[in-house]
Each structure stands twice: as structure tokens, then as C-alpha cells.
Image (cartoon, grey):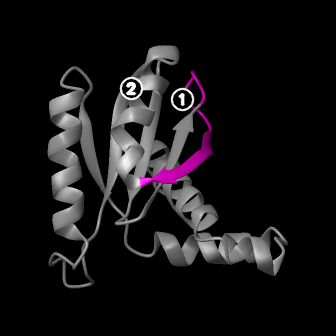
Amino acid sequence: MARILCIDYGGKRTGIAVTDPLQIIASALTTIPSKDLITFLKQYIQTEEVELILIGEPLGLDDKPTHATPLVKKAIQQLKREFPAIPLITVDERYTSKMASRAMIDMGMKKKDRQNKGNIDQIAATIMLQEYLGNR
């Protein structure tokens, strides 16, 4: 089987998580500068088979777009253009950053590591991916 990849896209950084080839476990992969996303994915997809891309959709509590929504919409269009053969699904990303921060505390991560926003992005992507796996 191929992997499922999940993206927590941001203006500066993008957290990426992937499943194992059997699509059972979601794991944090990396955090990269958002401007490098397409280049990173092209390299990753050359070495790993990806069956589906998930991307977090930023919506407010009222289900209306947030300030980050236009950035993500632009990234979605670019992903569809660059990887037309790979389906792309948006997933709700509300509260994932807060959940990621809580998870880091629960794991006993040092304060310095918890302040690294790249760690939050990776864990948020992992949470979205794990929720997707649990709901399918």
C-alpha cells in the first residue's frame, strides 16, 4: 500500500506527517519552510509512494474562513497542479495546534522543545492524520 501524507500549512512553516505503508500509524515527518513545500514533496514522492494528500483547512468556530484560509487555498491549487494524479482532501484543523501543545506537555517534552513552533506543526499534522485514519 501507499502512504497518506498530511500537511499543516502555514505562512512560514509547514508541518508534515505520514502514515506507514499499511496506513495504520501516523507519524510526524518534518517541518519545512512553506516556500519549499513543492520541492520537498517532489523529492519525497520520488522515493515513497503517496496515495492521498490531506491538508488542514483553517476555519473559525463559526465555520467561516480565517486569515490563513487564502494561503491554504493557494497552496491547494498549487498541489493540485503539481500532483494531479494524487487525490487531495481538506480536513478540519481547528484546535490541532492547541492539541499539539497539550500532547507535548503530556509527553514530558522540555519547555525549550515545546517552544519550537516546528514541533507544534509536525504534531498538528500528525493529529489531523490520525483523526482521518480513525474516521475512515
Q: Position of residue 1 (x, y in %)?
A: 49, 15
Given residues 134 and 109, the one toward you in this image is: 109
- Labels 1, 2: front one: 2
Residue stretch in magenta: 20-33
Q: Amino acid at mark 2?
A: Lys
Could you tell me which secondary element the residue under label 1 belongs to?
loop
What residue sits 37% from the left and 65% below the top?
Answer: 93
Q: Position of residue 112 (x, y in %)?
A: 78, 77
Within-10-Å neighbours for mark 2: few <14, some 14–19, many 20+ = few
What residue sits 58% from the left and 63% below the top?
Answer: 118
Q: Amino acid at mark 1?
A: Gln
Q: Which residue is mark 2?
A: 42
The residues tagged by marks 1 and 2 sit, at their Cα atoms, a distance apart of: 21 Å
Q: Quick check: is 28 in the magenta stretch?
A: yes
Q: Position of residue 16 (x, y in %)?
A: 50, 47
Residue at the limit of the structure toward the bottom, as seen here: 62
Q: Which residue is mark 1?
A: 23
What residue sits 51% from the left and 50% below the top?
Answer: 32
Instruction: State which quadrant residue 63 falls in.
Output: bottom left
Within-10-Å neighbours for mark 1: few <14, some 14–19, many 20+ = some
Instruction: State which quadrant residue 65 falls in.
Output: bottom left
Q: Is residue 100 above or below residue 90?
A: below
Relative placement, left or right, of 91 versus 49 is left
